[in-house]
Amino acid sequence: MTKNGILCEVADKRVCLDPKNSDSMGINFVSHAHSDHLPSKNGGTILSSIETNEIANLRGFKMENHIDSLDNFSLIDSGHILGAKGLLFDDIFYTGDICTRDRGFLKGAKVPKCKTLITECTFGLPEFVFPKLEDTLKQVNELISELYGKGIPVILMGYQLGKAQTITQFFGHWGPLYLHDSVKDMNSLHQKFGVPLTDGIGHTEAEQNGLLDKKPWIMVAPMLSSKNKFVQDMKSKYGAVTIGFSGWAQSTKFSFGRRTDYSIPMSDHCDYNELIDMVIQSGAEQVYTIHGFVDEFAEDLRKRGISAQPLLENSLDDFT
């Protein structure tokens, strides 16, 4: 682990995994297009899926020297968001952000066998076990029905890229459907790639045409603070109620998952049990933990007889 991220030097190759800045001398793998995984500068060769490249363009980062395949490197669906991949090379598998659970158009990852596994553990504590998806859908549909019965409009909130699209697919049968402008742009790109999402009118157009005055309605929006002007306007003008979707929603320790009127546990990551199962299925002889509860999850793996350690800066210069 370096200041620039994870560097693997194997078989005379220099492979950077989700680097902060692309390495001009190496192969730079970008697992997906969430902002915390996109490099801030170009350099060298950038390997990612076609979808990740186009989403990055939409988000303002144009990948130079982009390729979507390379001999002896296998991009494996990670189930996180559209275009998200893990990378298998030289018997090393890097998960990127990963989810092994099916969620609408997103199919859960199938983890390949490997000797070395580098895995995220965002929810790597036993307290993070998510409810079954069908139970969550039932709960939310009943809540929307109750609010609709009172003439109350509903704003469903989740990350603009990933969560917002699954929310649109799961609850787009409610209408009229409006989309925050930023979500509409991202949904349109998903539709370009064949993702079946219900069309909705952007919130600016809907408000200008007086459509939001005709209640109830449903809107899909990014996860925003209750102090955000958009949220305050929707509440003060239209009496909207917010329902937020987050893997942190049930946590007693982390309040940022409960910034909405109702908080629903739903994540684009593995929960704790799924992480354990994923590691076991990989058959890895050595596991390195990154992003999240790296110490706690590595310790839990060691208790299960699996060689594991956090991958911290300067803990390893490389591995071969």
Image (cartoon, grey):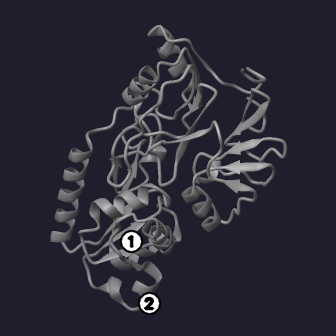
* Amino acid marked by disc 2: Gln
Image quarter of the C terminus: top right
Is label 2 or label 1 in front? 2
Query: Which numbered marker is on residue 208?
Result: 2
On the image, the x and y values in percent for residue 170 come to 29, 59
Could you tell me if residue 24 is visible in this image?
Answer: yes
The image shows a total of numbered marks equal to 2
Tell me which amino acid carries mark 1. Answer: Lys
Residue projecting furthest to the bottom: 209
Measured along the vertical axis of the image, is residue 33 above or below residue 132? below
Relative to 164, 92 lies left or right: right
Say the numbered circle drawn on residue 293. none
Relative height, residue 54 to residue 153 (above, below) = above
Q: Residue 218 lies in what quarter of the image?
A: bottom left
* Mark 2 to mark 1 CA distance (whole Å): 17 Å
Q: Quadrant of the N terminus?
A: top right
Q: Which residue is mark 1?
A: 235
